[in-house]
Image (cartoon, rainbow, N blue to C red):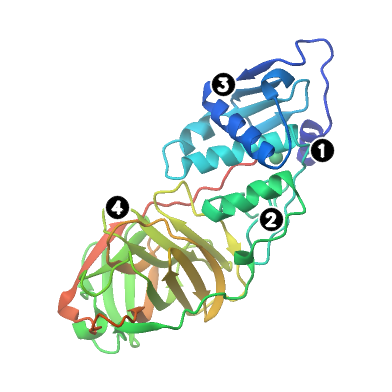
Amino acid sequence: MKLSLYIFILFIPLFVASCGDPNEYRVEPVFAEYVKRFETEAAKRGKDYKLQTEGLIIEFAKLKNDQAGLCHYENPIRIEIDSVYWKKISVVAGADYMKENLIFHEMGHGILGRKHINSTLENGDWKSMMCGGDKVDNRPWNINYRRERRNYYVDELFTESTSAPLYTTTELLVDTSNFTQRLWLTFNTGSKSDTGWELGTNSNYTAEIDNSQLKFSSKFTSSYGILLAVQNDYINIKSDFSFEMEIDAKTTANTDQYGMVFAVNTKDTTEYFKINREQNMYPGNSKWYSYYTQLKKATINKTGKNKLKVVKIAGIIYYFINNVYVYQTEVELFGYGNNFGFIVPAEATVWIDNLKIGTKSSSNTTLKTISIKDITFSIVKMKDNNESISDK
Ligand SMILES: [Zn+2]
Protein backbone atom coordinates (compact mmCIF):
# COMPACT_ATOMS: atom_id res chain seq x y z
CA MET A 1 0.00 0.00 0.00
CA LYS A 2 2.73 2.35 0.97
CA LEU A 3 4.69 1.45 -2.15
CA SER A 4 1.84 1.92 -4.55
CA LEU A 5 0.85 5.18 -2.97
CA TYR A 6 4.45 6.29 -3.04
CA ILE A 7 4.91 5.48 -6.73
CA PHE A 8 1.66 7.18 -7.45
CA ILE A 9 2.78 10.34 -5.70
CA LEU A 10 6.30 10.46 -7.07
CA PHE A 11 6.31 9.02 -10.52
CA ILE A 12 2.96 9.44 -12.19
CA PRO A 13 2.90 12.91 -13.60
CA LEU A 14 -0.08 14.75 -12.28
CA PHE A 15 -0.71 17.66 -14.52
CA VAL A 16 -3.24 19.75 -12.79
CA ALA A 17 -5.36 21.30 -15.44
CA SER A 18 -6.06 25.01 -15.56
CA CYS A 19 -5.43 25.63 -11.93
CA GLY A 20 -2.75 28.26 -12.19
CA ASP A 21 0.11 29.70 -14.14
CA PRO A 22 2.19 26.79 -15.54
CA ASN A 23 5.24 29.05 -15.44
CA GLU A 24 4.76 30.22 -11.89
CA TYR A 25 8.06 30.63 -10.05
CA ARG A 26 7.64 30.63 -6.30
CA VAL A 27 10.63 29.48 -4.28
CA GLU A 28 11.06 30.17 -0.56
CA PRO A 29 14.09 32.49 -0.15
CA VAL A 30 16.08 29.86 1.83
CA PHE A 31 15.85 27.45 -1.12
CA ALA A 32 16.78 30.00 -3.82
CA GLU A 33 20.53 29.53 -3.36
CA TYR A 34 20.22 25.80 -4.08
CA VAL A 35 18.06 26.34 -7.16
CA LYS A 36 20.68 28.74 -8.46
CA ARG A 37 23.40 26.18 -7.77
CA PHE A 38 21.41 23.54 -9.59
CA GLU A 39 21.20 25.79 -12.66
CA THR A 40 24.92 26.55 -12.42
CA GLU A 41 25.85 22.87 -12.17
CA ALA A 42 23.49 22.07 -15.06
CA ALA A 43 25.05 24.84 -17.18
CA LYS A 44 28.53 23.41 -16.55
CA ARG A 45 27.22 20.23 -18.14
CA GLY A 46 25.65 21.93 -21.11
CA LYS A 47 22.09 21.92 -19.79
CA ASP A 48 20.32 25.22 -19.82
CA TYR A 49 17.52 25.80 -17.35
CA LYS A 50 15.78 29.08 -16.78
CA LEU A 51 13.53 28.06 -13.96
CA GLN A 52 12.50 31.61 -13.08
CA THR A 53 10.68 31.80 -16.42
CA GLU A 54 10.00 28.10 -16.95
CA GLY A 55 8.36 27.79 -13.52
CA LEU A 56 9.04 25.97 -10.25
CA ILE A 57 7.50 25.93 -6.80
CA ILE A 58 9.47 24.96 -3.69
CA GLU A 59 7.66 25.46 -0.42
CA PHE A 60 7.77 24.36 3.20
CA ALA A 61 5.29 21.72 4.33
CA LYS A 62 4.61 19.38 7.20
CA LEU A 63 5.29 16.04 5.54
CA LYS A 64 4.09 12.71 6.84
CA ASN A 65 5.69 9.24 6.92
CA ASP A 66 9.14 10.53 7.83
CA GLN A 67 9.55 12.31 4.51
CA ALA A 68 12.14 15.06 4.19
CA GLY A 69 11.03 16.20 0.76
CA LEU A 70 8.40 15.40 -1.82
CA CYS A 71 8.15 16.18 -5.51
CA HIS A 72 4.73 16.69 -7.09
CA TYR A 73 4.64 16.25 -10.84
CA GLU A 74 2.39 19.22 -11.41
CA ASN A 75 2.74 22.04 -13.86
CA PRO A 76 4.97 23.65 -12.80
CA ILE A 77 6.85 21.10 -10.69
CA ARG A 78 6.04 21.63 -7.03
CA ILE A 79 8.45 20.48 -4.32
CA GLU A 80 7.61 20.32 -0.64
CA ILE A 81 10.33 20.37 2.01
CA ASP A 82 9.57 19.26 5.52
CA SER A 83 10.06 22.27 7.79
CA VAL A 84 10.95 20.20 10.87
CA TYR A 85 13.69 18.30 9.04
CA TRP A 86 15.06 21.51 7.50
CA LYS A 87 15.28 23.13 10.91
CA LYS A 88 17.00 20.09 12.43
CA ILE A 89 19.73 19.94 9.79
CA SER A 90 20.27 23.70 9.84
CA VAL A 91 22.19 23.67 13.12
CA VAL A 92 24.85 21.07 12.37
CA ALA A 93 28.18 21.00 10.57
CA GLY A 94 27.62 20.07 6.95
CA ALA A 95 24.15 21.67 6.90
CA ASP A 96 24.82 23.24 3.52
CA TYR A 97 25.72 19.87 1.99
CA MET A 98 22.62 18.26 3.48
CA LYS A 99 20.33 21.02 2.21
CA GLU A 100 21.84 20.94 -1.25
CA ASN A 101 21.52 17.15 -1.29
CA LEU A 102 17.82 17.34 -0.45
CA ILE A 103 16.92 20.11 -2.94
CA PHE A 104 19.03 18.54 -5.72
CA HIS A 105 17.37 15.17 -5.07
CA GLU A 106 13.88 16.62 -5.44
CA MET A 107 14.91 18.65 -8.49
CA GLY A 108 16.42 15.42 -9.82
CA HIS A 109 12.92 13.98 -9.76
CA GLY A 110 11.06 17.05 -10.97
CA ILE A 111 13.44 18.76 -13.38
CA LEU A 112 15.63 15.88 -14.59
CA GLY A 113 12.96 13.17 -14.47
CA ARG A 114 15.18 10.88 -12.42
CA LYS A 115 13.78 8.01 -10.39
CA HIS A 116 15.15 6.38 -7.29
CA ILE A 117 18.24 4.26 -7.71
CA ASN A 118 19.38 2.28 -4.71
CA SER A 119 22.45 0.47 -5.94
CA THR A 120 25.84 0.87 -4.28
CA LEU A 121 29.43 1.36 -5.34
CA GLU A 122 32.24 -1.11 -4.64
CA ASN A 123 33.08 0.50 -1.28
CA GLY A 124 29.43 0.43 -0.16
CA ASP A 125 28.63 4.10 -0.79
CA TRP A 126 25.27 4.83 -2.35
CA LYS A 127 25.69 5.03 -6.13
CA SER A 128 23.52 8.11 -6.40
CA MET A 129 22.04 10.98 -4.46
CA MET A 130 18.79 9.69 -5.99
CA CYS A 131 18.69 6.93 -3.35
CA GLY A 132 15.34 6.79 -1.59
CA GLY A 133 11.93 5.15 -1.50
CA ASP A 134 11.80 1.47 -0.58
CA LYS A 135 14.57 0.63 1.84
CA VAL A 136 17.30 -1.85 0.93
CA ASP A 137 18.19 -4.19 3.84
CA ASN A 138 16.75 -1.52 6.11
CA ARG A 139 19.73 0.71 5.37
CA PRO A 140 19.22 4.37 6.34
CA TRP A 141 19.45 7.01 3.59
CA ASN A 142 22.48 8.66 5.15
CA ILE A 143 24.78 9.50 2.27
CA ASN A 144 28.38 10.61 2.53
CA TYR A 145 27.67 13.73 0.52
CA ARG A 146 30.77 15.75 1.26
CA ARG A 147 33.89 17.14 -0.39
CA GLU A 148 35.18 14.98 -3.27
CA ARG A 149 32.09 12.78 -3.10
CA ARG A 150 29.90 15.82 -3.67
CA ASN A 151 31.55 16.34 -7.07
CA TYR A 152 30.88 12.76 -8.09
CA TYR A 153 27.27 12.82 -6.88
CA VAL A 154 26.51 16.02 -8.79
CA ASP A 155 28.08 14.52 -11.94
CA GLU A 156 25.99 11.40 -11.44
CA LEU A 157 22.83 13.45 -10.88
CA PHE A 158 23.10 15.01 -14.33
CA THR A 159 24.68 11.97 -16.03
CA GLU A 160 23.56 8.66 -14.60
CA SER A 161 26.27 6.74 -16.50
CA THR A 162 29.07 8.61 -14.67
CA SER A 163 31.71 6.05 -13.76
CA ALA A 164 32.60 5.37 -10.15
CA PRO A 165 35.46 7.48 -8.81
CA LEU A 166 38.79 5.86 -8.01
CA TYR A 167 38.39 6.23 -4.25
CA THR A 168 35.43 3.86 -4.28
CA THR A 169 37.56 0.87 -5.21
CA THR A 170 38.21 -1.69 -2.49
CA GLU A 171 41.84 -1.62 -3.50
CA LEU A 172 44.06 0.41 -1.18
CA LEU A 173 45.73 3.07 -3.30
CA VAL A 174 48.19 4.52 -0.78
CA ASP A 175 51.05 3.14 1.27
CA THR A 176 49.87 2.91 4.87
CA SER A 177 52.83 0.91 6.10
CA ASN A 178 55.28 3.74 6.65
CA PHE A 179 54.44 4.52 10.28
CA THR A 180 56.61 4.19 13.35
CA GLN A 181 54.97 2.90 16.46
CA ARG A 182 54.96 5.42 19.30
CA LEU A 183 52.64 3.84 21.82
CA TRP A 184 51.58 0.26 22.42
CA LEU A 185 49.32 -0.63 25.32
CA THR A 186 49.23 -4.40 25.90
CA PHE A 187 47.11 -4.50 29.07
CA ASN A 188 49.10 -7.54 30.12
CA THR A 189 49.52 -6.40 33.70
CA GLY A 190 47.83 -3.88 35.95
CA SER A 191 50.74 -1.45 35.78
CA LYS A 192 50.01 1.91 34.23
CA SER A 193 52.66 1.38 31.60
CA ASP A 194 50.53 -1.46 30.25
CA THR A 195 47.10 0.07 30.74
CA GLY A 196 47.49 3.79 30.00
CA TRP A 197 44.17 4.36 31.66
CA GLU A 198 43.66 4.52 35.40
CA LEU A 199 42.02 1.38 36.72
CA GLY A 200 39.36 1.33 39.40
CA THR A 201 35.69 1.42 40.18
CA ASN A 202 33.39 4.36 40.74
CA SER A 203 29.71 5.12 40.39
CA ASN A 204 30.02 5.52 36.59
CA TYR A 205 32.22 2.63 35.50
CA THR A 206 34.71 -0.09 36.35
CA ALA A 207 38.07 -0.25 34.55
CA GLU A 208 40.09 -3.37 35.21
CA ILE A 209 42.45 -5.85 33.62
CA ASP A 210 40.69 -9.02 32.50
CA ASN A 211 42.53 -11.81 30.71
CA SER A 212 45.28 -9.41 29.57
CA GLN A 213 42.79 -6.92 28.17
CA LEU A 214 41.37 -3.65 29.44
CA LYS A 215 37.81 -4.30 30.52
CA PHE A 216 35.65 -1.21 30.80
CA SER A 217 32.15 -1.69 32.20
CA SER A 218 30.01 1.41 31.80
CA LYS A 219 27.14 2.35 34.05
CA PHE A 220 26.43 5.46 31.99
CA THR A 221 23.01 5.52 30.35
CA SER A 222 24.38 6.92 27.09
CA SER A 223 27.41 6.43 24.87
CA TYR A 224 30.79 7.63 26.17
CA GLY A 225 34.22 8.15 24.69
CA ILE A 226 37.10 7.01 26.89
CA LEU A 227 40.13 8.97 25.78
CA LEU A 228 43.85 9.20 26.32
CA ALA A 229 45.53 12.51 25.66
CA VAL A 230 49.08 12.20 24.51
CA GLN A 231 51.36 15.20 24.84
CA ASN A 232 51.54 17.32 21.73
CA ASP A 233 55.24 16.92 21.11
CA TYR A 234 54.71 13.22 20.45
CA ILE A 235 51.65 13.02 18.26
CA ASN A 236 49.37 15.50 16.63
CA ILE A 237 46.11 14.75 14.93
CA LYS A 238 46.87 17.47 12.40
CA SER A 239 49.71 15.29 11.12
CA ASP A 240 49.48 11.83 9.63
CA PHE A 241 49.03 9.01 12.11
CA SER A 242 47.95 5.41 12.49
CA PHE A 243 45.75 4.22 15.32
CA GLU A 244 44.53 0.73 15.98
CA MET A 245 43.03 -1.48 18.67
CA GLU A 246 41.33 -4.79 19.17
CA ILE A 247 37.88 -4.35 20.61
CA ASP A 248 35.17 -6.66 21.84
CA ALA A 249 31.87 -5.56 23.35
CA LYS A 250 28.95 -6.87 25.29
CA THR A 251 26.11 -4.54 24.43
CA THR A 252 22.42 -4.32 25.27
CA ALA A 253 21.37 -4.64 21.62
CA ASN A 254 23.09 -5.92 18.47
CA THR A 255 22.51 -2.52 16.92
CA ASP A 256 24.53 -0.71 19.63
CA GLN A 257 27.57 0.98 18.14
CA TYR A 258 31.05 0.77 19.62
CA GLY A 259 34.49 1.48 18.29
CA MET A 260 37.26 4.01 18.22
CA VAL A 261 37.39 7.77 18.57
CA PHE A 262 39.99 10.46 18.09
CA ALA A 263 39.71 14.13 18.80
CA VAL A 264 41.40 17.49 18.83
CA ASN A 265 40.42 17.92 22.45
CA THR A 266 37.74 16.56 24.71
CA LYS A 267 35.50 19.63 24.46
CA ASP A 268 35.40 19.98 20.72
CA THR A 269 34.53 17.74 17.84
CA THR A 270 35.40 14.04 17.76
CA GLU A 271 35.89 11.78 14.77
CA TYR A 272 34.70 8.21 15.20
CA PHE A 273 34.73 4.79 13.59
CA LYS A 274 32.00 2.60 15.02
CA ILE A 275 30.75 -0.88 14.24
CA ASN A 276 27.96 -3.09 15.51
CA ARG A 277 27.11 -6.77 15.75
CA GLU A 278 25.03 -6.53 12.58
CA GLN A 279 28.24 -6.04 10.58
CA ASN A 280 27.67 -2.36 9.96
CA MET A 281 30.33 0.30 10.15
CA TYR A 282 29.71 3.99 10.79
CA PRO A 283 32.36 6.59 9.95
CA GLY A 284 31.51 10.05 11.19
CA ASN A 285 32.14 13.24 13.09
CA SER A 286 30.28 14.31 16.21
CA LYS A 287 29.49 17.79 14.91
CA TRP A 288 27.60 16.45 11.94
CA TYR A 289 23.93 15.54 11.94
CA SER A 290 24.67 11.83 11.98
CA TYR A 291 27.24 9.28 10.77
CA TYR A 292 28.23 9.87 7.15
CA THR A 293 26.74 6.61 5.96
CA GLN A 294 26.06 3.06 7.15
CA LEU A 295 28.19 0.44 5.42
CA LYS A 296 27.71 -3.33 5.51
CA LYS A 297 31.08 -5.00 6.00
CA ALA A 298 31.29 -8.79 6.02
CA THR A 299 34.76 -8.60 7.51
CA ILE A 300 33.26 -7.59 10.87
CA ASN A 301 33.14 -10.53 13.29
CA LYS A 302 29.65 -10.81 14.73
CA THR A 303 31.05 -12.19 17.97
CA GLY A 304 34.40 -11.75 19.66
CA LYS A 305 37.12 -9.27 18.89
CA ASN A 306 37.49 -7.00 15.91
CA LYS A 307 40.67 -5.19 15.07
CA LEU A 308 39.87 -1.63 14.00
CA LYS A 309 42.45 0.64 12.46
CA VAL A 310 42.50 4.10 10.96
CA VAL A 311 45.36 5.67 9.09
CA LYS A 312 45.32 9.37 8.32
CA ILE A 313 47.31 10.43 5.27
CA ALA A 314 47.03 13.90 3.73
CA GLY A 315 43.61 14.66 5.17
CA ILE A 316 42.10 11.30 4.25
CA ILE A 317 41.19 8.62 6.79
CA TYR A 318 41.68 5.04 5.60
CA TYR A 319 39.65 2.49 7.56
CA PHE A 320 40.60 -1.14 8.17
CA ILE A 321 38.65 -3.95 9.83
CA ASN A 322 40.57 -7.09 10.76
CA ASN A 323 43.44 -6.02 8.50
CA VAL A 324 41.17 -5.52 5.48
CA TYR A 325 40.97 -2.05 3.95
CA VAL A 326 37.28 -1.13 3.83
CA TYR A 327 36.73 2.60 3.22
CA GLN A 328 38.24 6.03 2.95
CA THR A 329 36.89 9.53 3.41
CA GLU A 330 38.07 13.04 4.29
CA VAL A 331 38.67 13.88 7.94
CA GLU A 332 36.58 16.68 9.46
CA LEU A 333 38.93 17.38 12.37
CA PHE A 334 40.90 20.57 12.03
CA GLY A 335 43.37 22.06 14.45
CA TYR A 336 45.96 20.58 16.73
CA GLY A 337 45.02 17.73 19.01
CA ASN A 338 46.09 14.55 20.64
CA ASN A 339 43.19 12.47 21.98
CA PHE A 340 42.69 8.82 21.15
CA GLY A 341 40.33 6.28 22.66
CA PHE A 342 37.36 4.00 22.41
CA ILE A 343 33.57 4.29 22.53
CA VAL A 344 31.50 2.33 24.97
CA PRO A 345 27.70 2.28 24.45
CA ALA A 346 25.22 2.81 27.30
CA GLU A 347 25.54 0.22 30.07
CA ALA A 348 27.85 -1.92 27.94
CA THR A 349 31.18 -3.58 28.59
CA VAL A 350 34.05 -3.36 26.15
CA TRP A 351 37.41 -5.11 26.12
CA ILE A 352 40.39 -3.37 24.53
CA ASP A 353 43.69 -4.93 23.57
CA ASN A 354 46.86 -3.96 21.71
CA LEU A 355 46.12 -0.28 21.31
CA LYS A 356 48.80 1.21 19.09
CA ILE A 357 49.50 4.69 17.81
CA GLY A 358 52.10 5.46 15.20
CA THR A 359 53.36 8.51 13.34
CA LYS A 360 55.17 9.05 10.05
CA SER A 361 58.91 8.81 10.14
CA SER A 362 60.63 11.98 9.18
CA SER A 363 64.31 12.67 8.76
CA ASN A 364 64.45 15.82 10.86
CA THR A 365 62.70 14.59 14.00
CA THR A 366 63.75 11.99 16.47
CA LEU A 367 60.85 9.75 17.27
CA LYS A 368 60.53 8.84 20.91
CA THR A 369 58.39 6.15 22.35
CA ILE A 370 55.63 7.77 24.32
CA SER A 371 56.19 7.75 28.02
CA ILE A 372 53.21 6.73 30.08
CA LYS A 373 53.77 9.67 32.40
CA ASP A 374 52.93 11.93 29.48
CA ILE A 375 49.44 10.50 29.05
CA THR A 376 46.34 11.91 30.62
CA PHE A 377 42.99 10.22 30.74
CA SER A 378 39.54 11.67 30.17
CA ILE A 379 35.95 10.64 29.64
CA VAL A 380 33.56 12.47 27.35
CA LYS A 381 29.90 12.01 26.69
CA MET A 382 29.41 11.19 23.03
CA LYS A 383 26.66 12.78 21.03
CA ASP A 384 24.53 9.88 19.82
CA ASN A 385 25.00 10.90 16.20
CA ASN A 386 22.68 8.15 15.18
CA GLU A 387 19.95 9.81 13.14
CA SER A 388 18.55 8.04 10.12
CA ILE A 389 18.13 10.45 7.26
CA SER A 390 14.48 10.77 6.29
CA ASP A 391 13.12 9.49 3.01
CA LYS A 392 12.94 11.91 0.12
ZN1 LIG B 1 13.09 10.75 -3.97
Quarter-of-image position of residue 230? bottom left
Query: How many residues crowd around disc 2 within 10 Å: few (fewer than 14), some, or many (20 or more)?
Result: many
**Residue shown at the point (41%, 37%) measured from the top left:** 91
| Residue 142 visible within the image | no
For marks 3 and 2 on the same chain, the one whose residue lies earlier in the sequence: 3
Q: Is residue 6 left or right of residue 312?
A: right
- Ligand 1 within 8 Å of the CB at mark 1: no
User: Marks 1 and 2: CB-CB under 8 Å?
Assistant: no
Residue to which mark 1 is pinned = 4
Residue to which mark 3 is pinned = 28
Query: How many residues crowd around disc 1 within 10 Å: few (fewer than 14), some, or many (20 or more)?
Result: few
For marks 2 and 4 on the same chain, the one whose residue lies earlier in the sequence: 2
| Camera-side mark, 3 or 1 | 3
User: Marks 3 and 1: CB-CB under 8 Å?
Assistant: no
User: Marks 1 and 4: CB-CB under 8 Å?
Assistant: no
- Ligand 1 within 8 Å of the CB at mark 2: no
Residue to which mark 2 is pinned = 127
Quarter of the rendering occupied by the C terminus: top right
Query: How many residues crowd around disc 4 within 10 Å: few (fewer than 14), some, or many (20 or more)?
Result: few
x%, y% of residue 197? 24, 75
Quarter of the rendering occupied by the N terminus: top right
Residue to which mark 4 is pinned = 268
- The Cα–Cα distance between marks 3 and 2, rounded to whole angstroms, is 30 Å
**Position of 344 relative to 372 (above/below):** above
Q: Name the kind of residue labelled 1 in the image.
A: Ser
Q: Quadrant of ligand 1?
A: top right
> At numbered mark 3, what does the secondary structure look like: helix, strand or loop?
loop
| Camera-side mark, 1 or 4 | 4
x%, y% of residue 310? 44, 72
